[in-house]
Image (cartoon, rainbow, N blue to C red):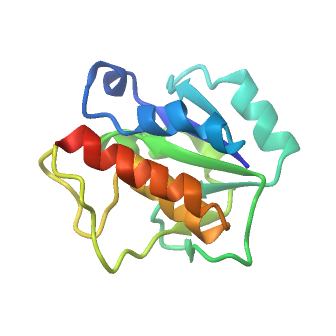
Amino acid sequence: MFITLLTHSEELKKNTNTGRLVAEYASTFDVDCARVIWQRKVPDPQLLERLRNKTSALLYPAKNAKELNAAFSPEHWVLIDSTWQQARKIYNHSPYLHPLPHINLSSNEGSVFSLRRNQVPGGLCTSESVAAIAATNGMGGFARCLADALEAMQS
């Protein structure tokens, strides 16, 4: 599995960014992870190359999004690592993301992430989202590791 965290530059300044947990622990579980800083006018060439050469999906709650399930397991996952407001901006200004299959997470439990305000109801933080993908794809160890790291980050 390859995960691209398309990250808003402001996220790198925040100690509450959970994408860093994904980047930190991914290799321990044989998951490739790239943090790509989003630039409106200059899309990352390596990301564009991965989108051309790998079966990819975007985790983003769009109208045409399908629910996450084990039957659909792309090689490459793209997640927008930002606030919800920034994520909408990144998505709207990144036409190369629009043709990708869109996947949505439906969380019955809701997020345990409590370090930021203005959360979207039912929305998960980046590390919780990756944990859901990992659990659905038989990588329970990675999912548990991310949950434990998020809990430690908030304590």
| Quarter of the picture holding the C terminus | top left
Residue 84 visible in image: no
Q: Where does the image place residue 66, in percent across and percent down from the top left?
A: 58, 76
Q: Residue at x 81, y 54 (%)?
A: 55
Q: What percent of the width, then of the height, locates residue 41?
A: 55, 21
Q: Residue at x 57, y 63 (%)?
A: 140
Quick check: 127 above or below 49?
below
Q: 47 or 19, which is in the foreground?
A: 19
Note whether 69 is above or below 40 in the view shown.
Answer: below
Foreground: 107 or 55? 107
Identified at 67% across, 63% down, the residue is: 101
Seen from this angle, which residue lies furthest left?
A: 117
Left or right: 93 in relation to 46:
left
Instruction: Kindly tell me whether residue 21 is visible in this rendering.
Output: yes
Please tell me whether residue 143 is drawn above or below residue 84 in the rendered image. Answer: below
Please tell me in which quadrant of the rendered image residue 46 appears. Answer: top right
Q: Is residue 55 left or right of residue 100?
A: right
- Where is residue 69? Give x, y as percent: 63, 77
Q: How many marks?
A: 0
Q: Residue at x 27, y 42 (%)?
A: 152
Could you say where residue 78 lies in the image, as x and y percent from the top left?
Answer: 60, 47
Asked which quadrant contains residue 87, the reply is top left
